[in-house]
Image (spheres, grey):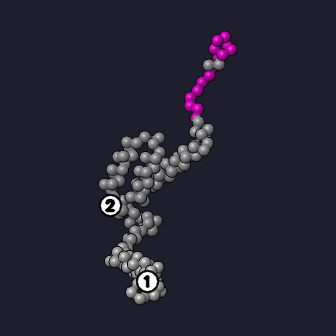
Amino acid sequence: MPYVFLLLFFICIVGVFKPFKGLKRWHFGLAAFASFLMVGFTGPKTPVTPSPSDMTPAQQQAMEKQNAPKIDELRKQASKLSADETQGNLEIYKQLTALAPANEEYASKFNHYTQQAQTEASYADHPEQALTVGNWDWGTGGFGSIMI
């Protein structure tokens, strides 16, 4: 139904610029306004889903039980990734947090990988921050005049 009103709207807009059948511009302007409103009234309604913060703990746990198959699949994917794969882990834990909002483990790992991704993003501007020195040991050699 909204497509009919949308078509009528465009016809009326054309009529505003070039009136036909002896009608005046304001007639078409008024009809365009009315059809524009009708597009909004008859358009599809988007469902409103409650956010996890609006849910009670019982509702959050029920949501986690309902999403258990998808959660298990995502946990398997997460176990295959190494801890160094920040973007992959971030995406998985973002989905897990959305599917199981009451689970503190998923939320903490999501926060951890978010911070890690932000840190890695800052390396583009300051690459010297990415430098780490691992295990190192030094001594002297060559009659004590050469550092090894």
Residue 87 shows up from this direction? yes
Q: Main secondary structure of the magenta part?
A: loop
Q: Is residue 127 above or below residue 69?
A: above
The residue under the point 56% across, 31% down is 134
Residue shown at 41% from the left, 88% from the top: 22
Any mark on residue 19, and which? 1
- Toward the top, the furthest residue is 143
The amino acid marked with disc number 2 is Gln
The image quadrant of residue 45 is bottom left
State the residue lying farthest toward the right.
Answer: 145
Residues 107 and 80: in front is 80
The residue shown at (43%, 78%) is 14
Q: CA distance from mark 1 to mark 2?
A: 58 Å
Front-most of 8 and 103? Answer: 8
Q: Amino acid at mark 1?
A: Pro
Q: Nearer the viewer, residue 5 or 141?
A: 5
| Secondary structure beneath label 2 | helix
Q: Is residue 93 left or right of residue 141?
A: left
Residue 108, image x and y in percent?
A: 48, 52
Q: Residue at x 52, y 47 (%)?
A: 117
Give the magenta part as a residue range. Answer: 132-146
Secondary structure, mark 1, is loop
**Whether residue 43 is situated above or below residue 104 in the rendered picture:** below
Residue wearing tag 2: 66
Percent x, y of residue 80 = 37, 42
Residue 12 percent coordinates (x, y): 41, 80
Relative horizontal placement of residue 144, taking residue 24 as reference (left or right) = right
Q: Work out whether mark 1 precedes mark 2 in sequence or the reverse, and give the earlier one.
A: 1
